[in-house]
Image (tube, rainbow, N blue to C red):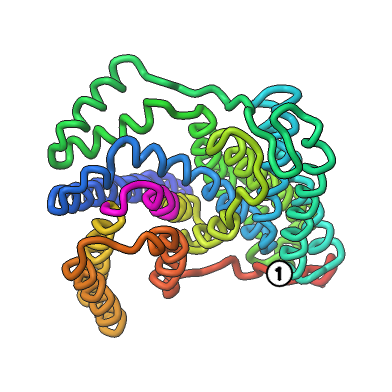
Amino acid sequence: MSTSTTTKNASPGLVQRLTKNWFYLTLVGIAVVSLVRIVTDTNDLDSAGTLRAAIISTCPILMAALGGLWAERAGVVNIGLEGQMILGTWGAAFFTYHYGPWVGILGAALLGMIGGLLHAVATVTFGVDHIVSGVAINLIGAGAATYLAEAVFSDYEGGGPRQLIGLDPPTIITKTPVISEAALDLADKHWFFVSDVASVVAALTTNISTLTFIIFGLVVASAWILWRTSFGLRLRSCGENPQAAETLGVNVYLYKYIAVLVSGALAGIGGGFLALVSSSGYGAGQTGGRGYIGLAAMIFGNWRPGGLLMGALTFGYTDSLRLRDTDAVHALLLLVALALLLIAALRAVRGQINGAIVMGVAGALVLAWFLLTDSVPREFTVMTPYVTTLFVLALGAQRLRMPAADGQQYRKGSAG
């Protein structure tokens, strides 16, 4: 009785503290970005247009990361996210052409799920190495989409062997009454902090796809299912200790299959977003490695929904920034330098001297790069999201903890 009471009382306090920490961290982040914007006189750094583009770039990466989270929490490494996203782009285009955009999103999820099913059969049933199977799924996904596009889309209006354009997007919210106008007006004043918050509000209320909100809702739903339900507890136990889960009556094979199927469906939705929201149709190679970046975002997020969301937003922001003014990328150097120096100071306070020195030196080098140059080469801006991928993984490598049985082969009866 006392244990139950203690747990109930402690849990809200923990949740409240975590919520407050995220809230304060967000406020500090906005303040730092605002300071950099004013110092560098680069208003495009976090304008409503930049943030809107960042959200569009984030969503496919976020879906791939979330798909990876479902699979790996059940103990299955899903390197095949890229191939499942590719299948999703074709499925979205085909079903949208015939039945409309919302059926197209379901079609994208279905095609991604088929890719997940192939991966589950190979890894769970036949015990194929997860990395080998994932690479095979990527090759199969790319090859199947290319074949199907040539075989089907060539006869469609607006279609060809490598594309199908002119597709209707999901519903777009052009303006939210009162809120959009007020937020845009405040953002244009370029005040410290206030205008930056207004830019965020404007980006979320002006010319934004309803699918975007569904995607962020899926992150919240996944967090609740995996960490607040008995189903989620059983699924995560399959990724931590499947033998122990088996002794408790958990059907490990079933949960692994469900996780990988959901993983493929989520990656497919990410591909559907690319085909219907990020662009106006299917195009060969349009995933651009976002499945791999999503996997990196999941690892950076330490296999947690909140962490992968931050990772996906980071990658999405840098990906969108390269499409805009190069001055914004140059201003980003100052932002990175300040972040590194802050991390160095925090590690020094915690007694992590080696880490503090490494972060301090890196921050000083990036700061010198910013101070000694007026711009960055256009070639570097193209590399920005990939450099960011390597950077954040190196930054977070010391605190990562994957599920204990992630990637390991499991055979029924091995617990006995």
Quadrant where the C terminus sits is: bottom right
The spot of residue 236 in percent (x, y) is: 63, 57
Q: Residue at x 57, y 44 (%)?
A: 222
Residue 162 in view here: yes
Residue 390 lies left or right of residue 416; in this view the side is: left
Q: Residue at x 35, y 50 (%)?
A: 18
Residue 228 lies left or right of residue 395; in this view the side is: right
Q: Residue at x 67, y 44 (%)?
A: 268
SS at circle 1: helix
The spot of residue 226 in percent (x, y) is: 58, 48
Q: Write down the quadrant of residue 108 in the picture.
A: top right
The spot of residue 162 in percent (x, y) is: 71, 44
Q: Residue at x 81, y 54 (%)?
A: 118
* In front of the other: 261 or 199: 199
* In front of the other: 302 or 292: 292
Q: Which residue is mark 1?
A: 131
The spot of residue 336 in percent (x, y) is: 28, 63
* In front of the other: 115 or 346: 115
Q: Give the residue at the far bottom of this rendering.
A: 354
- The stretch in magenta equals 314-327
Classified by dominant secondary structure, the portion drawn in magenta counts as: helix
* In front of the other: 401 or 179: 179
Residue 306 in view here: no
Q: Residues within 10 Å of mark 1 (few under 14, many from 20)?
A: some
Q: Write down the quadrant of residue 356 in the picture.
A: bottom left
139, above or below 316, in the image: below
Residue 103 lies left or right of residue 298; in this view the side is: right
Q: The disc labelled 1 sits on which kind of residue?
A: Ile
Q: Is residue 34 magenta?
A: no
Q: Is residue 317 magenta?
A: yes
